[in-house]
Image (cartoon, coloured by chain):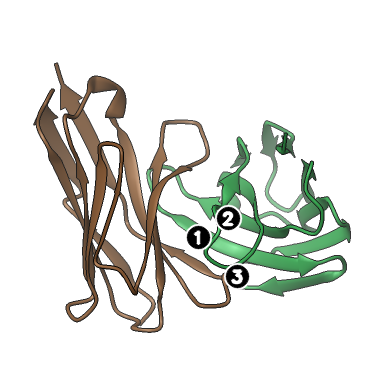
């Protein structure tokens, strides 16, 4: 019931395209959903996050679309650049803020 | 500025030997602290969290223990390493619910 799943497992897009990464969760008690970017050999870094009271969040070229009823969300990366090539993790957090469940990850490759 | 320092950067240890990993957070008082583990190519699994000195909660049982001897220090340890302990260990901090989680650079552990 704590599973957080991501699709696709890997994604290749051309430079300038919009990359769409998907995430779904099972536990309706999750109420905060951050997305992280991780480069090889480094710790993840927060990109953008959304609370379950919202259905959309934009920050620069990143947009989260959130569907509470369907328990899924997606991250749109507009105008993808080769420097965006990394692994992206969706995470889900409970009200307390002390527990965070990471998704399975999507490896994004942006081809010039 | 807040900084998070993890040590060591990498370790190669024998099965059955003890382990101690550490992290220090400077620039913030009373942060929430976390330990995560990541298998090569895998997702992040939260191991422990602590909201105050001397109090540590376990999220999963992996024959590891954690302690918070000081407000800014978090230690991960075990008396006997297993092959399955190999991976990337990440320390992280946040200021509580719905706030950004900042990750350290991690410790790469290889158990042989």
Label 3, label 1: how many angstroms apart (C-alpha)?
A: 13 Å
Which mark is on residue B58? none
Q: Identify the residue at image location x=41%, y=53%.
A: B43
**Mark 1–mark 2 CB contact (< 8 Å):** yes
* Crowd around label 3: few <14 · some 14–19 · many ≥20 (10 Å): many
* Crowd around label 1: few <14 · some 14–19 · many ≥20 (10 Å): some
Of circles 3 and 1, the one toward us is: 3
Relative vertical location of residue B91 with respect to residue A23 in this rendering, above or below: above
Q: Position of residue A80 (x, y in %)?
A: 19, 29
Q: Position of residue A66 (x, y in %)?
A: 23, 66
The chain under label 2 reads: B
Label 3, label 2: how many angstroms apart (C-alpha)?
A: 12 Å
* Residue under numbered circle 3: A98
In the rendered structure, the answer to whether residue A83 lies left or right of residue A17 reads right
Relative vertical location of residue A80 with respect to residue B31 in this rendering, above or below: above
First in sequence, mark 1 or 2: give its number. 2
Shade representing chain B: green
Q: Quadrant of residue A31?
A: bottom left
* Residue under numbered circle 2: B36
Q: Identify the residue at image location x=34%, y=74%.
A: A53
- Dot 3: what SS? loop
Q: Is residue B80 visible?
A: yes
Circle count: 3
Q: Are marks 3 and 1 on the same chain?
A: no
Chain letter of the brown region: A
Picture quarter with the N terminus of chain B: top right
- Pick the front one: A27 or B10: A27
In the rendered structure, the answer to whether residue B13 lies left or right of residue A3 reads right
Q: Position of residue B74 (x, y in %)?
A: 79, 54
Q: Is residue A35 visible?
A: no
């Amino acid at each position: 019931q704590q599973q957080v799943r991501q699709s696709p497992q890997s994604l290749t897009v051309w430079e300038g395209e919009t990359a769409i990464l998907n995430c779904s969760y099972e536990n309706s008690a999750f109420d905060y959903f951050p997305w992280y970017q991780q480069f090889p050999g480094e710790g993840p870094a927060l990109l953008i996050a959304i609370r379950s009271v919202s259905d959309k969040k934009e920050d620069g070229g990143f947009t989260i679309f959130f569907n509470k009823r369907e328990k899924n969300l997606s991250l749109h990366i507009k105008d993808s650049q080769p420097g965006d090539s990394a692994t992206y993790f969706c995470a889900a957090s409970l009200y307390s803020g002390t527990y965070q469940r990471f998704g399975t990850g999507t490896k994004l490759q942006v081809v010039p | 500025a807040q900084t998070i320092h993890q040590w060591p950067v990498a370790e190669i240890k024998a099965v059955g030997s003890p382990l101690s990993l550490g992290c220090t957070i400077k620039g913030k008082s009373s942060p929430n602290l976390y330990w995560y583990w990541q298998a090569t190519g895998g997702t992040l699994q939260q191991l422990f969290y602590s909201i105050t000195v001397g109090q540590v909660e376990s999220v999963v049982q992996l024959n590891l223990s954690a302690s918070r001897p000081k407000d800014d220090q978090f230690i991960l340890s075990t008396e006997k390493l297993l092959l399955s302990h190999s991976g990337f260990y990440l320390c992280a901090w946040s200021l509580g619910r719905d706030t950004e989680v900042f990750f350290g650079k991690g410790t790469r552990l290889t158990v042989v």
